[in-house]
Amino acid sequence: RAVKTVCDLAAKKAAGEKITMLTAHDAAFGALVDRAGVDLVLVGDSLAMVALGHDSTVPVTMDEMIHHAKAVRRGVREALLVGDMPFLSYQAGERDAIVNAGRFLKEAGCAAVKLEGGAEVAAIAAAVVRAGIPVVGHIGLTPQTAGQLGGFKVQGRDAASAAKLEHDARTLAAAGVSALVLECVPALLAGRITAELAIPTIGIGAGPHCDGQVLVTHDLLGLFRDFTPKFAKQYARLADQADQALAAFKREVTAGEFPAAEHSFGPLVEEKGGLAD
Ligand code: KIV
Ligand code: NA
């Protein structure tokens, strides 16, 4: 059953149906993940690293996010499109948050926005929701502020940190978020949060008890050869296939094998006398 609005997410949870979300950063990937039938397509600020070559998500700007969200919009027909609010596009205040979140809806045709942070951003999330913009929360490992968390590591391992995450989840749910991404959280803690909340949890590195799962599509497809985290299951190794295909192109052109007659227009050599076919 396809999700039509963010309201359907809670219905899916109530019906015990798993929710799927994948990232896309351009129209081609938007079309690919949409064809797979996922519920949500996230224009993640992973854009910064995956497509723009930055080594964190911090530098990506609102204008860059909107530019890519518009492209993804053109590739997606069915799934709900979620725009990821980049670092400092919402933290400075409710007005900033509403204006920037609104751009994802008005300029890029997104149905919702996602923002990182726990109780400390709940008032801002609530203001965006009151403005009529559905919000997806994101707690646990929050890459925009990974430095403050001591790096890219699992959150909520000790009792105090687990209690904070449970408090964050409750506070964001009370603020009116439509769903909550849990990143790098122990499976049992994610399960506890999932059981307590009426809104769905969408896990990434958060175990099987979440209501849904999200991965970065480039990770899932094995498009990177360098480090990928433990939770990022590679369903394919497209980087290896790409290597082979690209090397074959170079080899064939160098050897004069490509393009052959079937890739060319008209005869390959001047026909002397006789009739051309
Ligand atoms: O930016 C992103 O791709 C994300 C997902 C990993 C949830 O935030
Ligand atoms: Na993100």
Image (spheres, grey):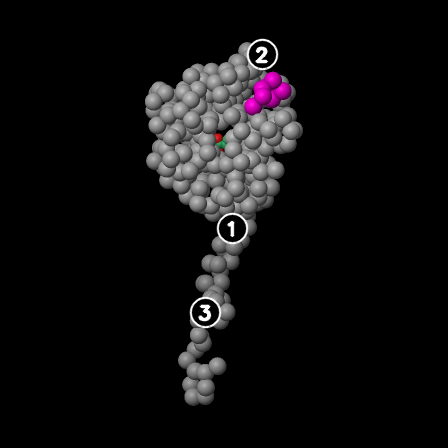
Q: Residue at x 50, y 17 (%)?
A: 174
What residue does disc 3 label? 264
Mark sitting earlier along the chain (1/2): 2
Label 3 secondary element: loop
Marks 3 and 1, how far apart at CA? 25 Å
Residue 40 higher or lower than 241, as above or below: above
Residue mark closest to the camera, 1 vs 2: 2
Residue mark closest to the camera, 3 vs 1: 3
Amino acid of disc 2: Ala
Label 2 Cα neighbours within 10 Å, binned few <14 / some 14-19 / many ≥20: few
Q: Position of residue 262 (x, y in %)?
A: 50, 69
Magenta part of the chain: 193-199
Marks 2 and 3, how far apart at CA? 67 Å
Can you see residue 192?
yes
Q: Position of residue 232 (x, y in %)?
A: 57, 34
Q: Residue at x 56, y 30 (%)?
A: 9
Mark sitting earlier along the chain (3/1): 1
What residue does disc 2 label? 159
Label 1 secondary element: helix
Q: Residue at x 46, y 58 (%)?
A: 250
Amino acid of disc 3: Ser
Q: Position of residue 111 (x, y in %)?
A: 46, 34
Label 3 Cα neighbours within 10 Å, binned few <14 / some 14-19 / many ≥20: few
Image marks 3 and 1: residues in contact by CB distance under 8 Å: no
What residue does disc 1 label? 243
Relative to 46, is 11 on the left or the right?
Answer: right
Q: Position of residue 67 (x, y in %)?
A: 37, 40
Label 1 Cα neighbours within 10 Å, binned few <14 / some 14-19 / many ≥20: few
Q: Residue at x 64, y 32 (%)?
A: 17
Residues 116 and 200: in front is 200
Q: Cβ of disc 2 within 8 Å of ligand 1?
A: no
Residue 198 magenta-drawn? yes
